[in-house]
Image: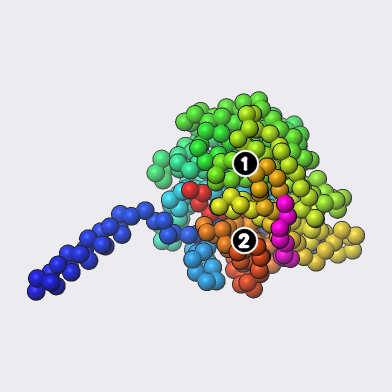
Amino acid sequence: MKMNFERSIALVVVLALLAFAPAVDAQIAVSANDNKVVNVNGTVKVVPNPPPDTVSIIDLKASPPRVIGEVQAPVSVAGPPLSIALTPDESLAIVTASNKVDPTDPTKQTPDNRVTVIDLKASPPKVLVTLEAGKGAAGISINRQGTLALVSNMVDGTVSVFTIQGKTVTPAGTVEVGGVKAGGGMVAIAPDGKTALVSRRDDHKVSVLSIDGTKVEYTKRDMTPGVRPIVLDIASNGAFAVVGSLAGGPTGDNDSISLIDLTAKPPRVVDTIGVLGATAEGLKISPDSSVVAVVVHNGSNRAKESPFYNDAGKLVLVRVTGKTLSRVAEAPIGHWSQGATFSPDSKTILVGNMVEKDYWVFQWDGRTLRDTGQRVKVNGGPAGIRTAEK
């Protein structure tokens, strides 16, 4: 009896410890799926009476990864595919919508400003509140402390600031970064929470912001990484950032990504490399800060009669070694592809394809990139994807 009693006590203690332990094993990705538009032989067209956009929760620990939840919320394929962000504890997702169907002409789109806060822990997941950012609300990031979210507004050339306290997200001001002539794109927050970078699509710059609590300021430090920089990411080690340029899309020219040295004072561009295809649409640095996954349209979104058309996009992996970039692997993907994300161990990569309305699953062992053949279907075109950044 005494031994059984002791075992029961031990079991209770273990269960209690598990209940209060941080959810380090939780591994989800959240996908923003646009149902408003389709690509018809190289032309983006608005769907008549489209169904609602959706947000899908994907379990990365399952094999193959699978959708475990869905909620309706406005999203948009326009802008960088980092249009969704998670709090570090994976309790909230915040998703932006840069475009919506024009209420005066349902065959067209017009800029949107909606920001939706989603409770990921609710069963099923649910929308908590819809807030407003600036016109063309696009790239978003949440700091590693889980207390601040920043949204880059593509049309306004501003950054909207939101505070996070528990499940309450509150607007906390707007910072002008170049204004309408500069435009916006993506904003990424450094791991220490004290610095952010903002891409400026229309005047070809990346700007540095300083962060002190809820006070966010434009430092007036700008860099010029390439033509039409939009998507960018900061490494989890805080040493560097990578930004993609979209110059070649209309003309079929190869695009590039650039490496920004964040250890330099002030930060600066130190290397640039081509990605062997037009339109470096998506970009994500692996959690171990070793490689960058670049999603390249490669003409897969063009008309079939176009001289720039290719019947597949590309996933290109670029290694970061000190202050240099080098291409190390590539693989074909689907059509009009958008975002990519890594599993926490940096070994699994998901790439979203708008035309196929799915994610392709790749494995990366540090040397070889392999298409597993696994596909994850979502309800809409996967316009953006993100995991928690811790």
Q: Secondary structure at mark 2?
A: loop
Q: Nearer the viewer, residue 273 or 43?
A: 273
Residue 18 quadrant? bottom left
Which comes sooner in the sequence, label 1 or label 2? 1
Labels 1 & 2 near each other (Cβ < 8 A): no
Q: Nearer the viewer, mark 1 or mark 2?
A: 2
Identify which residue is drawn at 64% across, 53% down: 291
The residue that mark 2 highlights is: 366
- Could you tell me if residue 326 is visible in this image? yes
Using the image, determine if residue 2 lies above or below residue 242.
below
Q: Give the quarter of the figure containing the N terminus.
A: bottom left
- Could you tell me if residue 45 is visible in this image? no
Identify which residue is drawn at 51% across, 64% down: 60
> In the rendered view, does 367 fall on the left or right side of 131?
right
- The magenta span reads 326-337
Where residue 48 sits: x, y (%)? 70, 60
Q: Nearer the viewer, residue 353 or 343?
A: 343
Identify which residue is drawn at 63% across, 32% down: 264
